[in-house]
Structures are given as structure tokens and as C-alpha cells.
């Protein structure tokens, strides 16, 4: 939800009839790559001083490697807020990954 607010803050005019739905997901996955500290990302080639920008080249390369190594997803720091993001690949949902709303 925080990321939606950030993206909307970039717009010159907010949509007047915007609606959001919030869902709680319970996720069970066997293989999650946990890169929850910025130092871990920096060691993998991410320029931490530019982490808040929209340059995704280094992080996309890490995600591609995680996918190649058959991880179901990654747990990574949020670029703008003190929380983590769970990023799951679409192919992870072809396996018995359990998600419930």
C-alpha cells in the first residue's frame, strides 16, 4: 500500500475516483531468497545510493539469477519504507505454493 501511495505522489493530478483493495495473503514457499539487508544487495552489485531510483537493472539481474536457481521468490528491502517486499515469480505458482486470501 505504501508503494501505491508513493507512485500516486508522483502524479501531477491524483485520480478522483480511485479505489484500492487490500488483501492479506498467507504464503508458504519452499525456497525464498532472503536479501533483507542493504549490504547483501550491495555485495551483489546494487548501487545502494541509487536504490530508491527506478533503475532496476541490477535488481532484475539478481531476480533472474534467483529464478534460474529455482527460488520461488525473494524477500528484499523496500526502497522507500522500513519494511520488506516479498517478490514471487509467476512460475512459483505452478508449484505447490500455498496462497490464501
Image (cartoon, rainbow, N blue to C red):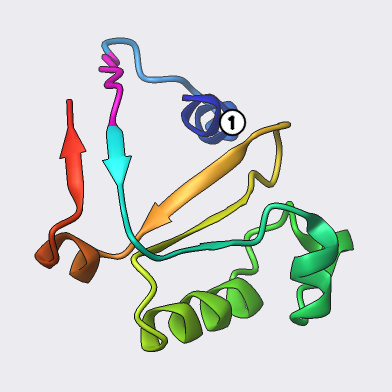
**Residue of label 1:** 6
* Element under disc 1: helix
Instruction: Describe residue 3's horizontal placement relative to residue 22 as left or right.
Output: right
Please tell me whether residue 8 is drawn above or below residue 65 in the rendered image. above
Quadrant occupied by the C terminus: top left
Check disc 1: other Cα within 10 Å, few if <14, some if 14-19, many if 20+.
few
Please state which of residues 24 and 10 is positioned toward the viewer in this rendering: 24
Residue at point 73%, 31% (across, down): 82
**Residue 64, percent from left and from top:** 45, 82
Residue drawn at the location 14% of the way across and 66% of the way down: 95
Q: Residue at x 45, y 20 (%)?
A: 14
**Residue interval drawn in magenta:** 18-25
**Direction from residue 98 to residue 59 in the image, left or right:** right
Instruction: Name the side, left or right, on which 77 lies relative to 14.
Output: right
Q: Is residue 78 above or below residue 48?
A: above
Q: Percent from the top left, x then y, of residue 4?
A: 47, 30
Asked if 44 appears above or below 33 in the picture, the reply is: below
Amino acid at each position: 500500500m505504501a508503494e501505491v501511495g508513493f507512485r500516486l505522489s508522483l502524479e501531477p493530478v491524483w485520480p478522483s475516483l480511485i479505489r484500492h483493495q487490500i488483501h492479506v495473503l498467507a504464503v508458504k514457499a519452499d525456497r525464498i531468497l532472503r536479501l533483507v539487508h542493504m549490504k547483501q544487495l550491495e555485495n551483489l552489485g546494487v548501487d545502494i545510493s541509487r536504490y530508491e531510483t527506478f533503475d532496476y537493472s541490477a535488481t532484475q539481474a539478481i531476480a533472474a539469477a534467483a529464478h534460474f536457481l529455482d527460488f520461488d521468490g525473494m524477500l528484499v528491502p523496500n526502497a522507500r519504507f522500513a519494511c520488506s517486499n516479498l517478490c514471487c515469480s509467476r512460475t512459483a505458482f505452478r508449484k505447490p505454493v500455498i496462497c490464501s486470501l
